[in-house]
Amino acid sequence: MMTWFRRGAGDVQILGRDPMVSEALESLDPASGEANYWFRFHRRVMAEASAELHRRRLMARLTVVDVMASWSRTVVPTAMLAAAVAALILVRAGSGSPESAPAAGLMAELPGEPVPVLEEPGAAVIFASFGPDNF
Amino acid sequence: MSDTPTDGELVYQAREGDEVAFGLLVQRYQRPAYAVALSVTGRHEDAEDAAQESFLVALSRLDECRSPERFGGWLMTIVRNRSKNLIRRESLRETDQVPPGARSSAPTPDKVAENVELRALLEDALAGLPEVQREIVLLHDMEGWKHREIAERLEIPSGTVRSHLHFARKALRAALGEVPGVPEILRKA
């Protein structure tokens, strides 16, 4: 098995920082060219994140009571309006005769509709019979 | 008990919109995020964009971070994905070419010029490494992360981290050593 501890003087650096590579890689750090680079980076991220953070704060502040309150703001007026309309309908319906009104509607004749007439039982039999004279 | 809040604590606070907590997370991971993005994109401008975007994506998806204590690893996955997407987008926009020499068009002092030169050499040398090796060598030798931290964040065995680091360093040393003048630049840097 390969160990990383016993490979010669040069490779001891494997477990720590490699001075040459580390030093070279420092030039890739944007702060090497601009001292306040990371401050600027941080500030830009925070500026762009502010709207989402604000939204999250609002959501976190919402309690069950808040939800119920906001819900009731919509539901209570709607329920009150529905109750008022129902009351109005009942009052208006109560001004006539509640018992006779549906029956009268059912009994009323529709204009233009022929009234069915009950024919004589005999006539129907004659019309529908097939006597020997017909053939 | 340490006063330094853990990632998990900060994530829980940031989920509720705590600006300070999120700010600390950004401060803690801005450099590693940049290093990972640089290891994928290979360009400073793209790495910067990808790292910044990644923090915003992480914030918007903070509720999806199932193990807040492992925020670092989760964030690095986002950084890697954003960086790859950015490269894909860039490759689709091939026509948008940067004029040669645009990077160093402004007159710069000697030190900056040397830095730019070394930077270009390193970018070329890093480009020749596999992505995972670039990421490990940057996190370890640029950001000072420990093998164990890298192994946890990348979710690979510690031995594999060491192995990748060894080969990455070997390749970098070889690449830098072949270029005339590099040791001088390193001495001055």
Image (tube, grey):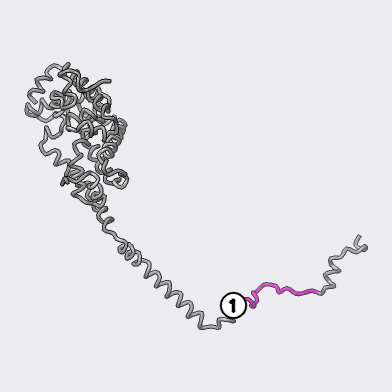
Can residue B117 be seen in this snapshot?
Answer: no
**Residue lying farthest to the right in this orientation:** A132
Q: How many marks?
A: 1
Residue positioned 79% across, 74% down in the render: A119
Residue B112 in percent (x, y) is at: 9, 29
Q: Main secondary structure of the magenta part?
A: loop
Q: Nearer the viewer, residue B46 or A60?
A: A60
Q: Which region is colored magenta?
A: A102-119
Q: Residue B28, how many percent across, how many down?
A: 18, 41
Q: Is residue A117 magenta?
A: yes
Instruction: Identify the residue position indicated by label 1 in the image.
Output: A102
Say if the magenta span includes residue B132: no
Picture quadrant where residue B55 is located = top left
Local crowd size for mark 1, using a 10 Å CA cut-off: few (<14), some (14–19), many (≥20):
few
Residue B27: where, in percent of width, then height? 17, 42
Q: Where B35 falls versus B175 (above or below)?
A: below
Tell me the SS state at disc 1: helix
- Residue at 18% from the left image edge and 45% from the top image edge: B24
Residue lying at 22% horizontally and 25% vertically, measured from the top left: B165
- The quadrant of the picture occupied by the C terminus of chain B is top left
